[in-house]
Amino acid sequence: MDLNTARPIIENILFIADSPITLEKIGEVFNGEMNKGEIKKIMDELKTDYNARGIQLMEIAEGYQLCTREEYAEWIKKFYKIDKGSKLSQASLETLSIIAYKQPITRIELEEIRGVDSGGVVRTLLEKNLIKNMGRKKVPGRPMMYGTTRKFLEYFGLKSLSDLPTLEEFKDDIQRGDMSQRFIPSLMRQKILVMAVVSR
Amino acid sequence: MTYQIKLPIFEGPLDLLLHLIKEHEINIYEIPIAFITKQYLEYIELLKNLNLEVAGEFLVMASTLIHIKSRTLLPKSEVSADMEEEGDDPREELVRKLLEYKKYKEAAGLLRDKEIAYKNVFTRKAESEIPDEDELLIEVSIFDLLSAFKNVVKNIKGSDTYEISVDEVSVTERINYIMEALGNSSYILFESLFSDMTRKMELVATFLALLELIRLKLVKIQQTKRFGTIRIFKTVEETKNGPEYSTANN
């Protein structure tokens, strides 16, 4: 099937879909008449089309979905009583960010980074389907490992995990302080002694 | 020294330390350990004065800080001076942990931004999925009902007991039971109708009562999708909006 015929078909499917749809899923509609590359090309075209429109075509959780735009939220809420529920707690977000970057990760490893007991948070996140069991680690005690779910991507409107900035990007941000002074024990010790005297 | 009481913000001792470091504009690689320990302990003291339970992790960190402080205050012995290579700073482990934690805290901040932004993006999926639109419901056939009932019978507890009891369960009594159950809510689930019944007799009578109510058009049975959960609704018109049984009274 040529692209010009397929494009409106795909657009119609996107219009009616109530969750992000993958290229594979759309491919099924065409019974193999369209390959993944062709569908991807149409998606890219549609995405560009929608950039000039009031709504947008977003890539979420490895799929595509027609969405409203953030800036019109107030208007939509005026028309339609809609609520996506309350926000996650800070503890949940911290835990999720660690799991997202370090998965698969055990609870002990997670708590090592956070410095606090995280059993309750992990349970809540499991219940919310934002994380899932990833099997057991082959170490004594065979602790459970956790990873993020597809729902996690959908919740934050992320295309994929690689959509998140790398940890190194955060690191750079932190280390913009003077690197040259890193761990110079003797010099530092003198300063500390001085400070200790002062603080007495 | 002013203390802002923003207690719930601190997710743990590392979070608190980062806050103190930021507040006093301290270089994270050059933490004045005596100073920060003092600040930290004062904060813990404040928590106690407020009668707040201080989590164990905060106390562990307090002891770690004091330990590091004592090590930095001790004069270097000859032996350890030889042993100590560059990098063997008692604070190094703490700094490493703080830096690592800080990265994830910032990542969490990013997730928060994404969360807030995406909460304002809506899709076709109606977030408030309230199945109160009758149009969405489809009628349930007698076969659906029968197979649902078959499942209920299959799942009854203690089904292998033989009982010979004579107390009769009347269908009329069961009809009253169903109507009473419906009186409290707009609908009840098919399964919940049988949830606390263990005797086959009861089940059969209740099912017959339900069929009778359907025949009399006192209830209607619907499900949101084929093979979905079967719901039982009362058919008394518009009791939600209008005064109850207004037509009956007039």
Image (cartoon, coloured by chain):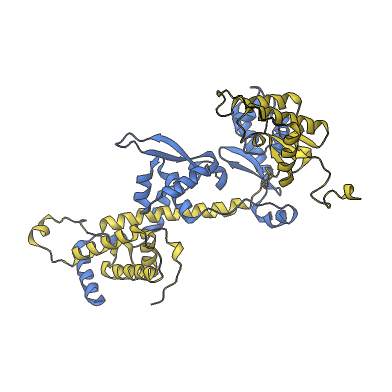
Chain colours: A blue, B yellow
Front residue of A53 and B232: B232
> As drawn, is B173 to the left or to the right of B17?
right
As drawn, which residue projects farthest toward the front? B166
Q: Is residue B64 visible?
A: yes
Residue A116 is situated, as x and y percent measured from the top left of the image, at: 37, 54
Q: Is residue B131 visible?
A: no
Q: Quadrant of residue A178?
A: bottom left
> As drawn, is A57 to the left or to the right of B78?
right
> How many numbered markers are drawn?
0
Q: Residue at x 55, y 52 (%)?
A: B114
Q: Residue A84, relative to residue A2: is it above or below?
A: below
Q: Residue A76, relative to residue B214: is it above or below?
A: below
Q: Quadrant of residue B52?
A: bottom left
Q: Residue at x 29, y 36 (%)?
A: A140
Residue A185 is situated, as x and y percent measured from the top left of the image, at: 20, 62
Q: Residue A152, relative to residue A94: is it above or below?
A: above
> As drawn, is A142 to the left or to the right of B69?
right
Q: Residue at x 82, y 46 (%)?
A: B238
Front residue of A73 and B68: B68
Residue B134 is situated, as x and y percent measured from the top left of the image, at: 78, 40
Q: Residue A15, relative to residue A90: is it above or below?
A: above
As drawn, which residue projects farthest toward the left? B78
Front residue of B17 and B132: B132
Image quarter (top left, top right, bottom left or bottom right) of the N terminus of chain B: bottom left
Residue A158 is situated, as x and y percent measured from the top left of the image, at: 55, 44
